[in-house]
Amino acid sequence: MGTGMEMEPLLQAWSYFRRRKFEQCAQACSRILEKEPCDQAAWSLKTRALTEMVYVDEIEVDQEGIAEIMLDENSIAQVARPGTSLKQTGTKKCEGPSPAVRPVTQSGRPITGFVRPSTQSGRPGTMEQAIKTPRTASTARPITSASGRSVRLGTASMLTHPDGAFINLSRLNMAKYAERPHLAKTLFEYIFHHENDVKNALELAAQATEHAQFKDWWWKVQLGKCYYRLGLYREAEKQFKSALTHQDMVDIFLYLGKVYIRMDQPLTALSLFKQGLDRFPKEVNLLCAVARIHEEMDDIKSASEYYKEVLKQDNSNVEAIACIGSNHFYTDQPEIALRFYRRLLQMGVYNCQLFNNLGLCCFYAQQYDMILTSFERALSLAENEDEAAEVWYNLGHVAVGIGDLNLAYQCFKLTLANNNDHAEAYNNLAVLEMRKNHLEQARALLQTAAALAPHMYEPHFNFASLSDKIGDLQSSYIAAQKSEAAFPDHVETRRLIEELKQHFAMI
């Protein structure tokens, strides 16, 4: 305005914070602290800004890596009753589409329509499975710590401080801060999220809880989060349950449910979420949590019901729309799936995966005019080679569908050029090679596919069929057994095994 008046520095810093310009906020606070090192308001605001820069929602962080499987001290039943464990798959018949229609992940569950932290790493069910599976970006990444997603963030942000860390944790008097509730909460968030120092965070939370005479629900939740990070699930459960007696909060139900899921007690988690829904009727986050558990337990029908309930409350929930769309696609209703994916497009979701799905839906719904434009858009939006590989793989499927096997061959080759670990592409290339009567190449490709994805039944069955044709009955029988283990209800595998048994009986 030309008056020469400047905004008061702390007010300006607060304005930056409110507009989520956290880096500028932290710099403004640093300038105030250079002039007045004891300015408590600026110190507190800078701490909050640094925390927000690296904040990770604890409810969504849930990756179980090899370290967690190996070092897990919680004992579970060796043979869990059907439908009571997330780790024991194949104990009951899948209520959704079979693996012949809907692909499964390495842990034996149908793939979901929405990538979540718990599904991203492939989540190996056992230590043996985790070691056997090839380490690729899309299967069992060897995550060595439960805080794999949040371990790095603090170190990156500390580079912004030329003088080192903003707060020297070793010199803090935790007891002094514990007596000042508002400062203590800000400091705890900084230590827990920015520094990722669970030990000091736990010490501060314990002293603050004691100072609050064990009546402050917020501190009990923070204690529970610390115990969860440390793998002490029973202690975390006690803290969250205690917090619930003081205060009904949706977050606490979600944290407690997360503890039960990690302890492999999905039915306890479900009953807990149902209690939460009694207190918070039609709460979207709780409905989503219930749907996810049903989906992980292969109860796709119930999962869809809950996702539909989610959409009644929040008709722009991306996860629910994507999962229902995916379910319709795999139950042979591509036209309805297309409507759900178009809805996502109208909402502003604009990425490679969505156009990939749209292209497939158009193909199966026989809307041929839109197929190539959707896949072209998907290729242009692919952020990495793995995404481009998926698009080329689906284009190969379209080429097979229209009978252009040369184009299909090229597409599957391009898939492997982008992602050399794409088991499905190896399997399909092998089938094309078999049609050309190149049996040795087909065998090699099928062996590669089976090694990369032991959970898929197709490479095992194709290898068994091929070996049977060329007279290698022993290899055929071994591969057929692997196929049956991956997909027990596959009729052709059973028939092949019966034929082989008759051959062996005649010898």
Image (spheres, rainbow, N blue to C red):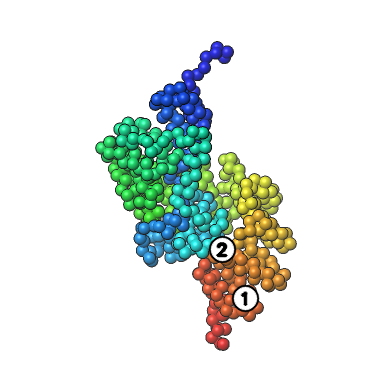
Q: Who is closer to the viewer here, 484 or 264? A: 264
Q: Is residue 63 above or below residue 168?
A: below
Image-based side of 372 in relation to 182, left or right:
right
- Answer left or right for 401 relative to 141: right
Residue with the mark numbered 2: 453
Residue type of the residue flagged with mark 2: Ala
Mark 1 residue type: Ser
Q: Quadrant of residue 363?
A: bottom right
Q: Is residue 277 visible?
A: no
Residue found at x 45% / y 62%: 126
Lower sequence index among marks 1 and 2: 2
**Callout 1: few (<14), some (14-19), or many (20+) C-alpha neighbours within 10 Å?**
some
Asked if 197 appears above or below 87 in the picture, the reply is: above
Q: Secondary structure at mark 1?
A: helix
Tell which of 184 and 386 is nearer to you.
184
Judge from the rendering whether residue 338 lies leftward or rightward of residue 174; answer left or right: right
- Judge by depth and name the residue closer to the eye, 316 or 133: 133
